[in-house]
Amino acid sequence: MTEKSAYLFAPLLVILIGAVTTEAVFEYKKSLQSLEIYLDKRVILQHSYTKPAIAIGKGKTKYENDLGNFHIEDELLKRISLNDFQVSDDPLLKEGQLEIDLGESPFHVRFSNPKYDVAITLQFESTSEGNVIRLKKSNTNTEYNRMWLRLTALPEEHVYGGGEQFSHFNLRGRTFPMWVREQGVGRNKSTMVTYLADLVAGAGGDYHTSYWPQPTFVSDRLYYAHLDFSFYSLLNFSSKHYHEIEMQENFEKAQIYMGTATSWPKLLEKLTSFMGRQPLPPHWLYNGAIIGLQGGTEKVLSRYRSLKEHNVKISAIWIQDWAGKFMTSLGKRVYWNWRWDKKMYPDLEKIMKQFKEKENVRFLSYINPHVIKGSEMFDEADNEGYFIKSARTGKTQLVDFGEMECGSVDLTNPKAYDWYKKVVQDIAKLGFSGWMADFGGEYLPVDDSVYYDGRPALEMHNIYSELWAQLNREAVKEMGIVNDVFVFMRSGFGKSPGYTSIAWGGDQNVDFSYGDGLASTIPAALSLGMSGMGLHHSDVGGYVSLLCMVRTEELVLRWAEMNVFTPVLRTHEGNRPDRNWQIYTNNATTKSFSRMTELYIKLTPYHGHVASENTNYGYPAQRPLFFHYMNDPQSYEEQYEYLYGQDLLVAPVLLEGQNQWSVYLPPDEWVYLWNSTQIIVKADKKGKGKTVQVHAELGNPPVFYRKGTQWEKLFQSFSKYNTDQRAKSSESFSWQLLWENPLISIYLLLRKLFWYILFND
Ligand SMILES: *[C@@H]1O[C@H](CO)[C@@H](O)[C@H](O)[C@H]1NC(C)=O
Ligand SMILES: *[C@@H]1O[C@H](CO)[C@@H](O)[C@H](O)[C@H]1NC(C)=O
Ligand SMILES: *[C@@H]1O[C@H](CO)[C@@H](O)[C@H](O)[C@H]1NC(C)=O
Ligand SMILES: *[C@@H]1O[C@H](CO)[C@@H](O)[C@H](O)[C@H]1NC(C)=O
């Protein structure tokens, strides 16, 4: 049913309850057979006997956990539609009384099915906190553990958000399960890498697998909806006529918050004031790139010095192995005992101090909420009972993180929480200016876990990531260093945007694949932005290198040139540093990267401006085109280009071997960043802009700025950084690296062959 045809529905008895306030409110319209509920004049729920909006049911869900790669199988046993409805006889609603301030006086609707003797009463309430749909009462048997609620959809409507979605920005046409887990390797069932990862380890992932799913979405009808519920849920946008939300297990706890606005910026302002916004990142971030290095004091310092020789601008050195390393069959891994390894990093404390003062360079470290068995910290926490326990043994529950068994800190235990907050604060006290706060609930099992506060594991799995973010925020807030530290997280859920300072996209493959490589970080940033988390970035060059998949110089440089136009430029050596191309692999790469750090610094005032818009208004740093071109229909379809702030349009080169790239430009006056060529784009009959071809040599990513912006002077100065003037990187690969790593050459050859034979690409 569409909004228009809905009016045909209301002949017999029509009660329209309206409110006089200017804030959005719920209203309803009903006839004998049908009910329509409006939020600020948008129809959001339509119910009739034949098209019921609510159903309950029962089912069994199996959760199979392969190192954080959850495989969820759902067996539906029964589904009962609640066809009948009755709107509450609110005591204030006397005959003849048509206007009621619903902010003070909510209405209820009782949906029922007499045949099964079941009923659910939903309350629609508009309060100062927003508009909430919540379950008021349920006359059901406890055997029911599923509820479905259908919100009205229009066939052509677009919906975005869902947390961090790497494959599809517009969520219409698909179902998005809300379950925190590893994103997987490949994430596209029709690619070779995914196939192999599934075969070898059940780790291929899928279009929806994400470390940060979040049941929040925004619609181009300019409303947001946030499901406050942490058991397993599904956002099903497959239907043309409704968005179906499925809640499993204890659905009585679910609440849906909604809000509306008149434009995209205003909608995000509202959503983020509900979620909580991210603080300003530290200003030292704009001193250059954060360089990921490891291997001990000596190695790190010598790498740092050689990068400096090539004039690489460095804001911080990130040493993820500060707590030490140990061997597994997959190679060296960080030792998960979150204390300084003095053997590996002698003099670290002194060096950090000296670097901060003399070189203006910070150090960053790494931590996650899991602690390895056999370590000093494990024994401490185990003795105090600070870990999540096993129901079976009554002792610490050990979780396998890949040849390492760990305890996970029970963040529902106030004592454990405080202890771990101190552990985190000790990192700052030692002299670090930030850390990767990795993981969250991804690996947490759902059978056999006992939490201190008694909540079931199925309820805790997702929300654990939010608690982990909250702990990190509190840790730095108490120390008064929120705006001086750089804490970055990959996992999230619920209201994580209010606690996370900066998100990073997790572990991409070291390739150009759309499902899990360079390109996938763009929809990830955009969807997280539309979920209220406006600061995002990714590892330059990607992270996951498996089998014969290794990264090339081209990938590293393409990734770096994109990240210049994001809030953060940070490198990572990847999971197999020696086999993959690094910014220090040869002098030419280092020089090219050095130029990128210069460009990143050049944008400093603009980076600061973009970040402050995010902090003050909740406008994400990386924005979809429609954010500022809401009348251009094509802007709603673009998921591989973005606006960085309002004034830069960035269309990164996402494939190998390109020297041309096509860029969609919405109607406006644009100037090409690298040579100041102007393009005036007029809207066509449908309101669309146009696609142009640009030269896109390595080092000059396709970027346009908006003519007449207040930043015009700054952007104009970029034309002197045109490729022609840069230090030419003549070698496209290093023979030395190939010689040392015959795998790279074999990989390049085999890939071409296999891909061609099997997948024709
Ligand atoms: C999603 O909704 C469609 C349309 O109602 C339905 O056919 C499909 O089974 C649903 N998917 C899931 C996973 O519930
Ligand atoms: C998945 O891979 C196929 C085949 O390479 C490709 O056509 C498709 O666009 C990919 N899907 C996504 C979401 O990347
Ligand atoms: C790389 O640069 C360093 C420092 O400038 C220099 O000493 C070295 O000779 C260069 N290597 C090559 C192969 O050019
Ligand atoms: C500037 O760059 C654009 C995009 O690559 C190209 O079409 C145009 O010819 C260039 N103009 C000049 C003057 O080089």
Image (cartoon, helix red, strand yellow):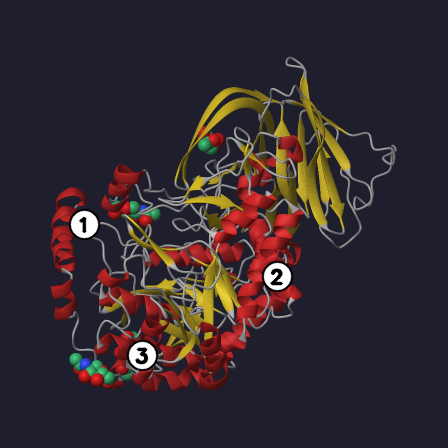
Identify residue for label 1: 761
Q: Position of residue 121 (x, y in %)?
A: 71, 29
Element marked by disc 1: loop
Residue 629 visible somewhere in the drawing: no
Identify residue for label 2: 475
Q: Position of residue 693 (x, y in %)?
A: 28, 68
Q: Position of residue 751 (x, y in %)?
A: 16, 51
Among the two numbered marks 2 and 3 on one chain, the one whose residue lies closer to the N terminus: 3
Q: Nearer the viewer, mark 1 or mark 2?
A: 2
Q: Nearer the viewer, residue 558 or 160?
A: 558
**Residue 389's image quarter?**
top right
Q: Residue at 56% across / 55% down in the picture?
A: 469
Asked if residue 520 lies left or right of residue 102, the reply is left
Asked if residue 335 lies left or right of residue 55, the reply is left
Inspect the image, locate mark 2, and give the three-letter code of the amino acid beneath it: Ala
Q: Nearer the viewer, residue 167 or 331?
A: 331
Q: Residue at 27% across / 73% down in the picture?
A: 584
Q: Residue at 49% across / 44% down in the picture?
A: 407
* Mark 1 Cβ inside 8 Å of ligand 2: yes
Element marked by disc 2: helix
Identify residue for label 3: 307
Q: CA distance from mark 2 to mark 3?
A: 33 Å
Q: CA distance from mark 1 to mark 2?
A: 49 Å
Asked if residue 551 lies left or right of residue 537, the reply is left
Would you place residue 699 above or below residue 395 in this image? below
Task: Name the quadrant where ligand 3 sits.
Answer: bottom left
Q: Nearer the viewer, residue 31 or 350?
A: 350
Among the two numbered marks 3 and 1 on one chain, the one whose residue lies closer to the N terminus: 3
Among the two numbered marks 1 and 2 on one chain, the one whose residue lies closer to the N terminus: 2
Q: Residue at 62% across / 51% down in the picture?
A: 417
